[in-house]
Image (cartoon, helix red, strand yellow):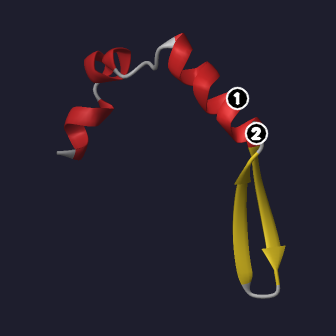
Amino acid sequence: MAKLYSEKKFLNEMQPKEETVKFLLNYSKALSVINYKKMKFEALLN
């Protein structure tokens, strides 16, 4: 199975759309993780 994913024909098909990349970058910029003692809080700053 690993050989299938390493072939060039599959690598060309797995390119993300520009919209997807922009969405993930914007989401990561807005995400804030706050560590308090042993807890983690995630806040989405929109």
Quadrant hosting residue 40 = bottom right
Residue at the outermost left position: 1
Q: Where is residue 35 in the image (x, y as percent from the top left)?
A: 81, 73
* Number of numbered discs visible in the structure rendering: 2
- Disc 2 on helix, strand or loop? helix
Q: What residue type is labelled 1?
A: Asn
Label 1: how many residues lie within 10 Å, few (<14), some (14-19) or many (20+)?
few
Q: Position of residue 45 (x, y in %)?
A: 78, 43
To which residue does mark 1 refer?
Answer: 26
To which residue does mark 2 refer?
Answer: 30
Label 2: how many residues lie within 10 Å, few (<14), some (14-19) or many (20+)?
few
Q: Where is residue 6 in the image (x, y as percent from the top left)?
A: 31, 33
Question: CB under 8 Å between callouts 2 and 1?
Answer: yes
Relative vertical location of residue 1 with respect to residue 9 in this rendering, above or below: below
Q: Residue at x 75, y 36 (%)?
A: 46
Q: Which amino acid does label 2 sit on?
A: Ala
Residue at the outermost front position: 46
Relative vertical location of residue 13 with respect to residue 45 in this rendering, above or below: above
Q: Residue at x 68, y 30 (%)?
A: 25
Please indicate whether residue 11 sits to the left or right of residue 18 in the image: left
Quadrant containing the N terminus is top left
Disc 2 versus disc 1: distance between alpha carbons? 6 Å
Quadrant hosting residue 24 = top right
Q: Residue at x 66, y 36 (%)?
A: 27
